[in-house]
Image (cartoon, rainbow, N blue to C red):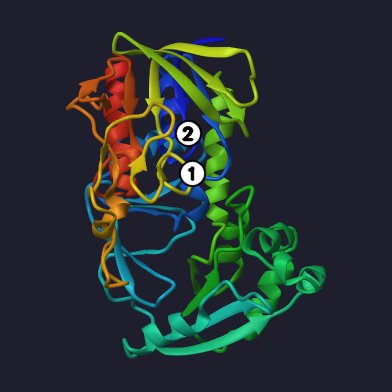
Amino acid sequence: MKFQTIIVGGGLAGLTAGLALQKKGVSCAIISSGENALHFSSGTFSGDCPEEIVPLFEEAHITLKGDPSKDSWRLTPSGSMQKVRLAFEDITLYSSQKISASNVLIANPEGFIDFPTSFIADGLSQQGISCKVKTFSLPCLKTLRESPSEMRSVGIAKKLDGCIEEVAERLRGLLEGEDLLILPQVFGLASPEPVRALRTALPVEIAFLGTMPPSVPGIRVQLQLKKAFERAGGTFLMGDTAVSAEIADGTVRLIRTKNLDSHILTADNYILASGTFFSKGLSSSMEKISEPLFGLDIDCPSERTEWYSEDFFAPQPYMAAGVVTDKDFHPLKDGAPISNLYAVGSILAGEKNAGMALTSTFKVIKKIAL
């Protein structure tokens, strides 16, 4: 099968690249093995973000809050504040490191252990904010509570999204004059409408905070981007994996995937947006860190003892590992650039954040869609 561009990786960078290129008339295929960093997303983008991301996401029916070039702050699940640039509409953004609330209710579905209510309360209490923690229960959650493995964010969202009026009534009964209600991100799996409905129905500001993975808003945004990409004419190879590639004379000639067997994929250009260790964009052994599909040059400490810091809370050097590229984002193999291959997102060596991923993605989009 022949395309103008083939993208390896169906996460934030890969889907953004595919959607933007399809909108510019460049035929694309995305090879996606499944889970990616969006499934762990806090719902916010830090670092410098390209302005183009806001209208592109709007076309995919994804509303972004904030300013790509100006810092805002969000409340984290530790009760602290974090600097961000953009956020999904679920997230409450603040103009400073101090939230205006003085009396807070933290409400959690009964039996849901993936939401750190005590951390949030402790963090806010250190700021002099009064906090109460309460649980709520609904009949629709009863079957989930019978199996702890089912009482996860996505399972809860599937149930609660279908009974938002009941949820609002139950939460209204818990309020005792608080000026902020904190809830876990377990609403709005298929659409942001349940989040909007709760904000309309309750007489208090609501802040939705992240839970342990999977991320409900992250999964929703991935599905919205995938649908927008396919509506634009893109081919999304879901649940497939790129297993080998052929390179000759400094160019990629073809890619083979697990599911397509003897069929090959060819393109004028290729984008590597495969992420890092979790999504298998990078792999490691006792001796080295490597990029498994193309065998690209990797920037990382040579000695294994230099991969990590003994300070558990310090930045870990191995997390900055990634492929080496030239100034045009062509990855190097044995010191030489591959002219029709580009690398974007967290597969790049250096700091990893959503702003960096999007910035590199849009720079490559402009080079391909000249």
At horizontal 43% and vertical 47% (from top left) the residue drawn is: 277
Residue in front for this viewpoint, 296 or 331:
296
Which residue is under mark 1? 279
Examine the rendered structure and indicate whether residue 288 appears above or below residue 170. Answer: above
At horizontal 55% and vertical 64% (from top left) the residue drawn is: 185
Q: For the residue marked with disc 2, what is the amino acid?
A: Gly
Q: Is residue 15 left or right of residue 80?
A: right
- Quick check: marks 1 and 2 in contact, CB under 8 Å? yes
Q: Is residue 235 visible?
A: yes
> Which-is-in-front pick, marks 1 and 2?
1
Q: Is residue 102 visible?
A: no
Counting from the top left corner in percent of width and height, residue 148 is at 72, 72
Which residue is under mark 2? 9
How far apart in space, not on screen, are marks 1 and 2 (Cα)? 9 Å
Q: Secondary structure at mark 1?
A: loop
Examine the rendered structure and indicate whether residue 26 appears above or below residue 315. Answer: above
Residue at the extreme front of the image, as rendered: 287
Quadrant containing the N terminus in the rendered view: top right
Residue in front for this viewpoint, 330 or 334:
334
At horizontal 60% and vertical 63% (from top left) the residue drawn is: 186
Examine the rendered structure and indicate whether residue 181 appears above or below residue 236. Answer: below
Counting from the top left corner in percent of width and height, residue 50 is at 28, 38
Numbered badge on residue 362: none
**Dot 1: within a 10 Å radius of its alpha carbon, few (fewer than 14), some, or many (20 or more) residues?**
some
Res. 174 image quadrant: bottom right
Q: For the residue marked with disc 1, what is the amino acid?
A: Ser
Upstream in the sequence, badge 1 or badge 2?
Answer: 2
Counting from the top left corner in percent of width and height, residue 234 is at 54, 21
Q: Secondary structure at mark 2?
A: loop
Residue in front for this viewpoint, 310 or 303:
303
